[in-house]
Image (spheres, rainbow, N blue to C red):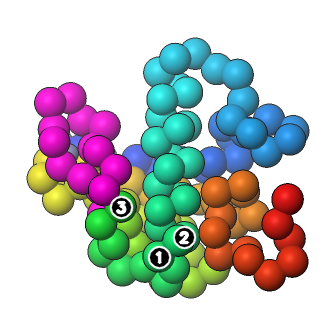
Amino acid sequence: MSNTYVTDITHYLDATGELAEMPGEARQLASFLALLIDAATQAFPARDYNTRIRCRAAACTGSIRASVASEDSEILWECPRCGHHGIIRKWQGTKWDQTRQEGLVG
Ligand SMILES: [Zn+2]
């Protein structure tokens, strides 16, 4: 029932790298993706990491698991409970990218 949800986080950002102004539903999705990037890259390199972020699917109480194999990889995420899953691209260098600890902060 669920297709892979492919998202490019840069589509949701404004020129300063913050979440852009957008309608409520899009903004909720963007916030969800930002949280996932933050959690997955904190655990980098992550493999089936439990982010403890609540699944977006209606009435699902699962928490999302995320994998990111390398700095060039997409972030893969999945809800083990309902199967909602997706891919996040272009997360590298965003403000939620916790892998860039050397130098570039701020
Ligand atoms: Zn779910």
Say what amino acid the circle numbered 1 marks: Ala
Q: Amino acid at mark 3?
A: Thr
Tell me which numbered mark, 3 or 2, is placed earlier along the sequence: 2
Q: Is mark 2 within 8 Å of ligand 1?
A: no
Q: Nearer the viewer, residue 43 or 83?
A: 43
Residue hosting label 1: 43
- At label 2, counting other C-alpha atoms closer than 10 Å, the crowd grade (few under 14, some 14-19, many 20 or more) is many
- Residue 14 x/y as whole percent: 80, 35
* Residue type (three-letter) at the residue carrying disc 2: Thr
Query: Looking at the rendered structure, which numbered label has been put on residue 51?
Result: 3
Residue 77 position by quadrant: bottom left
Instruction: Describe residue 95's horizontal placement relative to residue 27 as left or right.
Output: right
- Whether the residues at callouts 3 and 2 have beta carbons within 8 Å, the answer is no
Secondary element type, mark 1: loop
Q: Could you say whether the residue bearing mark 3 is in a helix, strand or loop? A: strand
What x and y, as percent, mark residue 104?
Answer: 86, 71
Q: Could you tell me if the residues under marks 3 and 1 are in contact, i.e. CB atoms within 8 Å?
A: no
Q: Which residues are magenta?
A: 52-65
Residue 27 showing in the rendered view? yes
Marks 3 and 1, how far apart in space? 9 Å
Q: Earlier in the sequence, mark 3 or mark 1?
A: 1
Residue in the picture at 47% in, 76% down: 43
Regarding residue 4, the answer to whether it shows in the image is no
Residue at 48 percent of width and 29 percent of height: 28
The residue labelled by disc 2 is 41
Between the C-alphas of marks 3 and 2, the distance is: 10 Å
Please name the residue shown 65% across and 64% down the image.
97
Could you tell whether 71 is left or right of 2 in the image?
right
